[in-house]
Image (cartoon, grey):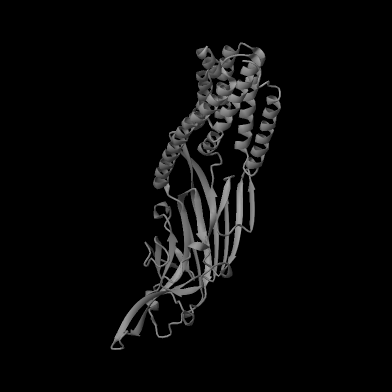
Amino acid sequence: METKNIQQFMNSYSVKMIIVSGLAILLLIPSFLIMDIINERIKLSEKVKNELYAQWGGKQVVAGPVLNVPFILQEKSETNQGVIERKGIAHFLPETLKTDGSLAPEKRKRGIYEVVVYEGSLKLKGSFVQPDVSQLDIPDAEYNWDAAYFTLGISDMRGIKNLPELIVNGQKCKVDPGVADTDLFQSGITVKANSIDLKQPLNFEMELVLNGSEDLSVEALGKNSEVTMKSSWAQPSFTGIFLPADRNVTAKGFTASWQVTHLNRNFPQQWVDRKYTTHDATLGVELLIPVDNYQKAMRSVKYAILFIALNFIVFLFIEIRNKTRIHPFQYSLVAFALLIFYVLLTSISEQVGFNFAFLISAIAVTSLISWYAHSILRNVRSTVWVTLLQAGLYVFLFVILQLQDFALLVGSIGLFVILTIIMRASQQIKWYSET
């Protein structure tokens, strides 16, 4: 009799629900392992992308030109027993700076991975006013105007494709690789002023052609800076601290223009040595590849508990209503089928794209679970309900993954509706009927 009571207790639906709930929680462990797999694929993708970028040219940031004038200052020593000679460099920014940029994008592939690179053309025009050294507050300094030079910052020198020339007041100036000082830029080119008369207004122009990847930015160093950029790429993302004043994005490409004055920046038009940095005055555009399969796959795995819990609840309802016994091991197989969906989604999306991969994976898993449910339940109506459940869940998940701004809103409303349906269905169950 005692053995029979124990068997009845173990076969009760209350115990069954506890076992199934614990099983659902335990089966979340494989979902974390799937997240690890996706993270590994993301890291491999980034590694391949970085290798391609290194061969073509990385993200490009162009800044300048800046006029630099070395000086010497005689200062008394701290003990007032002698004179110390201090050397420094005075930096003068352009009065006006106009940049016209054009990007020719191109997709490159290595294996299953794809990146976007570009060949960019920048036309720089502008002017310097006569340098006013009185603004530097070092009246005793001796300026070496003969050693003055211009510098232009370029973040990745490997991407330069032409032999740029800086034309100042109609005079072509020789361009040397590297920057003569690293006060402002870590890499770039230097142009010696030589015979140019710096004690007068200077008009300059330069054309720069360079390879880069993903992002092209410039620094708004002019007292009045105007920047325009255009490309045939239809998915731009505007970067930096300044957004375009005007922009037009269509399926055929984009155009954008910026207007920045010195009042929008946190540094003046002239200073000494490394007193200020210019990197905060950056603006530009990033060429996006809009579909990120791994990001969407990672988002979808986070809904694994929802899929497992709802399937287990539906199977429990069917089990109670139809007086059909389903073994916990069979629950586990259904859960593993649901988890296999995410592996299929990740692997197939690498080959054919996310949306088509989602359709293939959803149909495959829905068909598998429906077939297995029919073999257990032997009831067409119950099988139809299981199939509709899978189809509805995958449609719900797909809609959420496609949304950006309204994903949380739609997701929360959807979960509320699902909970309402479960509550309504639970009212039809006689929970304390004899088993």
Q: Residue furthest front?
A: 1
User: At which x and y percent is residue 253?
Assistant: 60, 46
Front one among 280 and 415: 415
Q: In this view, does 171 lie above or below 132?
A: above
Instruction: Kindly identify the residue that appears in the image at 52 percent across and 63 percent down.
Output: 281
Instruction: Kindly identify the residue that appears in the image at 46 percent across and 82 percent down.
Output: 137
- Residue 112: tell me if it is visible: no
User: At which x and y percent is residue 19?
Assistant: 53, 24
Q: Is residue 46 above or below residue 247?
A: above
Q: Is residue 214 above or below residue 7?
A: below
Location of residue 391 by image quarter: top right
Front one among 328 and 307: 328
Front one among 435 and 346: 435
Q: Which residue lies furthest to the bottom in this view?
A: 81
Location of residue 85 by image quarter: bottom left
Is 286 placed left or right of 193 in the picture? Answer: right
Is 196 placed left or right of 98 in the picture? Answer: left
User: At which x and y percent is residue 390?
Assistant: 61, 24
Is 98 placed left or right of 153 in the picture? Answer: right
Location of residue 334 by image quarter: top right
Instruction: Kindly identify the residue that appears in the image at 58 percent across and 19 percent down.
Output: 12
Specify the quadrant that holds the C terminus: top right
